[in-house]
């Protein structure tokens, strides 16, 4: 029974590692999306201001 517990434990650990990697990747992609949208917003504001000839 002891060896079976060991196998289950190690497979659980490797599953947890995989889950952590997936979560990190998703978090990274989410932060990238936020950065891109912030940049897009800034560019959008600059375009609006330049169209009206005003400086922000």
Image: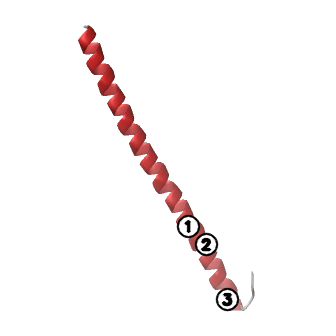
Horizontal side of residue 5 vs 32, given as left or right: left
Q: Secondary structure at mark 2?
A: helix
Structure colour scheme: secondary structure
Q: Secondary structure at mark 1?
A: helix
Left or right: residue 27 versus residue 53 is left
Mark 3 element type: helix
Indicate which disc, 3 or 1, sits on the residue closer to the N terminus.
1
Q: CA distance from mark 3 to mark 1?
A: 20 Å
Query: x%, y% of residue 48?
Result: 66, 84
Residue at the image position 53 percent from the left and 67 percent from the top: 36
Q: Residue 30 placed where, x, y %?
A: 50, 55
Q: Using the numbered discs, state the Cα–Cα distance from disc 1 to disc 2 in whole angstroms.
A: 6 Å
Residue 15 percent location from the top left of the image: 34, 32
Q: Are marks 3 and 1 in contact (CB under 8 Å)?
A: no
Q: Which residue position holds label 2?
A: 41
Above or below for 5 versus 27: above
Specify few, some or many for label 1: CA neighbours under 10 Å numbering under 14, 14-19, or 20 or more. Answer: few
Q: Residues within 10 Å of mark 2 (few under 14, many from 20)?
A: few
Q: Which residue is mark 1?
A: 37
Crowding at label 3, few (<14), some or many (≥20) Cα neighbours within 10 Å? few
Residue 50: assigned label: 3
| Residue 45 figure quarter | bottom right
Give the residue drawn at x 45%, y 46%: 24
Q: Residue at x 61, y 72 (%)?
A: 41
Answer above or below: position of 3 versus 39.
above
Q: Is residue 13 above or below residue 50?
A: above
Residue 2, how many percent across, how many down?
Answer: 27, 9
């Amino acid at each position: 029974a002891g060896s079976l517990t060991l196998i289950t434990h190690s497979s659980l650990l490797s599953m947890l590692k995989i889950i952590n990697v997936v979560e990190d990747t998703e978090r990274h992609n989410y932060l990238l999306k936020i950065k891109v949208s912030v940049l897009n917003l800034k560019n959008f504001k600059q375009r609006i201001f330049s169209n009206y000839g005003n400086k922000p």
